[in-house]
Amino acid sequence: MPSEFIIAVHAMAYLRKHSRLISSEELAENICVNPVRVRKVMAKLKAYGLIDTKQGLSGGYSFSIQNETVTLSQIYDALQMRIFHSNWRSGNAHLKCIVSSGMAQVMDDLYETMEATCYEKLKAISICDVVKELEQLYALKENTNERR
């Protein structure tokens, strides 16, 4: 899973949970990455219309779509990335060996299938679902700590 996707989902969940203007420094501190990485990812989310920005000293990012329909597939689309991909191919299509000559195509087909399956799953998960799951995990953790 590319780290940009993880950064984007984390940032979107944080923006949705806090419902206010948030700086790249605050996001970076919460995500535990450099603010420059956050700004690069957030620029793609802004271009796709998933977040709003305000520039200047009091600037930052805010959740653009105030409903529960923002899905992980929209974030994936905004980042213009592929989860299952390899620039390297094994074998040689010109050899007479069926394994060497066909492995690249078999793996490309497998990657395409995995990509499509993953994308369908991402379409079914909203940022609000992520926030709800985080809230449940936090409540469970708090309950466990209270019992100690």
Image (cartoon, helix red, strand yellow):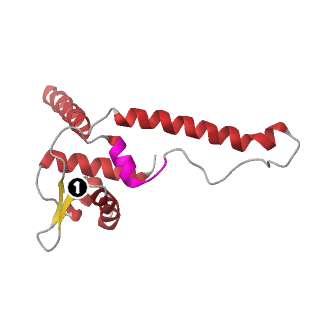
Say whether residue 100 is magenta.
no
Locate residue 49 relative to residue 6 in the image: left or right: left
Say whether residue 77 is magenta.
yes
Which residue in the protein does label 1 denote?
A: 51
Front-lying residue, 116 or 127: 116
Number of other residues with Cα within 10 Å of mark 1, as a class: few under 14, some 14 to 19, many 20 or more: many
Q: How many dots with numbers?
A: 1
Residue at (25, 40) in percent of width and height: 127
Locate residue 129 relative to residue 147 in the image: left or right: right
Front-lying residue, 88 or 76: 76
Quadrant of res 52: bottom left
Residue at (45, 36) in percent of width and height: 118
- Residue 125: x and y in percent read 31, 34
- In the image, residue 45 sits, relative to residue 106, either above or below, namely below
- In the image, residue 29 sits, relative to residue 117, either above or below, namely below
Locate residue 13 relative to residue 122 in the image: left or right: left
Q: Which residues are magenta?
A: 73-82
Quarter of the C terminus within the rendering: top left
Principal secondary structure, stretch drawn in magenta = helix
Front-lying residue, 29 or 2: 2
- Residue 22: x and y in percent read 16, 59
> The residue tagged with tag 1: helix, strand or loop?
strand
Q: Residue furthest bottom?
A: 56
- Residue 94: x and y in percent read 84, 49
Amino acid at dot 1: Ile
Q: Residue furthest top?
A: 147
Residue at (11, 50) in percent of width and height: 19
